[in-house]
Image (cartoon, coloured by chain):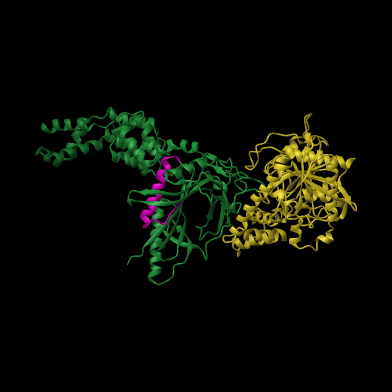
Chain colours: A green, B yellow
Amino acid sequence: MEDEVIIGLEVHVRLLTKTKLFCSCENREVEEPNTNVCPICMGFPGTKPMLNEKAIELAALAALALNCKINKTFSFSRKVYFYPDLPKNFQITQYDAPIGIEGELMLLKAGRKIRIRRVHVEEDPARLVHVGGDITSASYALVDYNRSGMPLIEIVTEPDLKTPAEAREAVATLALVLGHIGVCDPSAESAIRVDANISLAGGKRVEIKNITGFANVEKALLFEIARQKQLRAMHIEIEQETRHFDEIKKTTSSLRTKESEEDYGYIFEPDLLTYHITDSMISSLAPALEELPSKRISRLISKYQIPENYARIIIYEGKNFADFFEHTADIFEDRIMLAKWSVGDLLKCLNYNRIDVSQAKITPQSYAEFLSMIKSGEITERLGKELIKEFVATGADPRRLAERYKNENFENLDLTQVIEATIKENPKAVEDYRKGNQKALQFLIGKVLEKTNNTADPKKIRDMLNARVAQ
Amino acid sequence: MQAAYAPFISVAESIRFEITPQSLLPGVPVAVKDNICTKGMRTTAGSKILENYVPPFDATVVEKAKKEGAGIVGKTAMDEFGFGTFSTNCAFGVPKNPLDPERSCGGSSGGSAGAVAAFKLPIVSIAESTGGSITCPAAFTGTVGITPTYGLVSRWGLVDYANSLDKIGTIGKSVYDAALLLSVIAGYDEKDATSLRTQNTDYTAFAKPDGKKLRVGLPKEYFSSAVDSGIVKEVEMLADRLNSLGFELEQVSLPSTELAIPTYYIISMSEASTNLAKFSGLRYGLQLEFDEKQNIEEYFTKVRTEGFGEEAKRRIILGTFTRMAGYKDRYYLKALKIRKRIINEFKQAFAKVDVLLAPAMPILPPKFSEIEKLEPAQVYMMDILTVAPNMAGMPTVALPIGRINGLPVSVQVIADHLQEGKAIQMASIIEGLNGR
């Protein structure tokens, strides 16, 4: 009999605020280590935290989006543990009254809802840079405090997930939902980090720490299930422990075994107050909730009259992509053409370059110009498909791109000569076509286009070929 | 003075006064307790583990004093992180009482009071109290100490002992001096979330031996047999005198007083044990040689074993215990509930009277030879008269009212939250009586 798998997740999401949770340092990744820091986020003796209320707003928004009950009065606690990434050796987090409790998340592929246990706010520890290996093999580690004090929410699910694929879907869905309502930017590095708890029915619980990337969540769990099942088959007891996922080897390895539950000795954070979420704050969050993916899909369909499958793809690409679509739709009238190009070639090129649309140098204006060049016949659709690659990769002006392309290749191209050459080179196809084979015509048109680097109009080629072959 | 009484851990090499015609403290020397950060000047909190900590910023109180033309003359000796009653738990020498060098200045702000008592100069001190650390040394040195309402003075720049209890206050030679310094350092500070949004107040306006007759409460629990009978007698004589001057006197009861000591130590140690976690040798604390064979926990342990004094270790262990799962309900959470009860009892008393008058300390300043014989629990009992008002966050003025065998006897005047003015006014009246 197959062992039942029980998975619960702790998902850490970096909030999209301007500044850190308790100081005025910027809340963004800075490359040079230890330059985005101040005495507060480095925990200097004598400093005190000052709460960034925007973080509370975003956390409340996330909790509402996940259908949580909101704790309107809440406070912070100190979670004490000694670890080199914690400058104070305690983390300011929420323990007794998290901002949200008892929520839910709909998983479309799995076709069911999972329960959310809690949503709470906490500060991010520093980043450890392991030198000469990963956490298990490095010869030493460096500490970069740039990340210390960045605002996070931790979303804890109930152990309702049954497969690694469901776990992946849960994380991806959270990213989608929270991205659209502006709680986080899932495209940013390490914006979402996952701790996965997994056990086989009747077995001890293993925690895999700090997994980044949706696919890695699935891979780490697949490996871990296989490992646990193997142990079970060999009648070896599974130890309660914390494990690390190696992204390269796709395996997990033991970090530390837990003899008992860790005792963090939580006390109330005495440097902060009891805070309140007011009804007016909750009502001010209502417009953001209108941006939830399901609502936004419906809006896209009705507002732009585009097919549902396009709307769905646009929304599932995330907030940045959907915003880009809508900003372009404001200035480009043929929304169906826009949607088709967006979910087709635009997306393909972004994925090829492994960038988010916000990282590409294209703008809604330049994209609209590019599309209108195709629509007006200034460039062919085929050439468009060629040009968009460079357009997305470099963000260059599309009109200049097209001109350069034509100049470089076939500015004074004599289409008649190209057709003559093509006919000479493909006598068999010409013969077939004469016998009435339409495929042969398509083949010849393709060959001519190829020689013109897709700059010629296929209709014109067809007419000229027809005329020439009929002679 | 430093050679004779050792009030300072560090002394300023040079001082630059920023004086304008409007300065409130022009050229006034200010001594600062060594748990309050001074930019570019070593701040040890009396602990070896912080012997090399030079803060890159000034505490708000230091910044405010400098802005009014004062100069920081030095950092004063104290019990390590404030853990003590006699300033004997200091890693950098024990301050001696200028009234009798064989006796203690009290603690934990011992050096702050000692410096004020030692110099025949208009010197004032910025001190700090968690459970009585201003009232105690003021009483033992015959100086005046003001412990303000919790939140009146910004804690930005204070090296934490127990954040929900820590209050920066003042010590001076007179009620006026202490009130003047308080006027300078009090006020809202956005850098401290627990700071209260108050109007700037000139507390010297209350430091006059007249004004309307205040109603005075005598809390009977503060006159118990645990207090030296000579001290009780002096305070009762003062009460009689006030009565004869037309002050309305009323006996009040604060029944939870006997719970104050265990409650205070549970809360303060719980918080202290988390505050001291950062001193592990990674970013803060001693930087010792790292042995390749050690793991990080072993290194942390070595740093903490060498860096912390005995009392700090005791409080870390007790404070960790009282907040552990399984014990937290019985100790930490229960203490928080009793603290609320203690606050309510004070509030009820202040519905009837303006101020409470009580002995400041249960004993006269002891000799070091006597202190050595005390068990930790006996030392904790020295706080019996001060921890309740400190836990309730009530403003308190301690001042001398007489002498027994040449040693000072002091009272404390306690007022309701943010009623510093009343406590200062009452203290001034009492001060005026002594002058006559």
Q: Is residue A210 left or right of residue B171?
A: left
Most prominent secondary structure in the magenta stretch? Answer: helix
Q: Residue furthest left?
A: A435
A95 vs B185: above or below: below
Q: Residue A302 placed where, x, y %? A: 31, 34
> What is the quadrant of residue B265 in the picture?
bottom right
Q: Residue furthest bottom?
A: A235
Closer-to-camera residue (A313/A22):
A22
Question: Tag count in the figure?
Answer: 0
Report the span colored magenta: A155-182
Closer-to-camera residue (A126/A307):
A307
Residue A328 visible to the viewer: yes
Quadrant for the C terminus of chain B in the image: top right
> What is the quadrant of residue B157 in the picture?
top right
Question: Would you say residue B187 sits in the magenta stretch?
Answer: no
Closer-to-camera residue (B351/A168):
B351
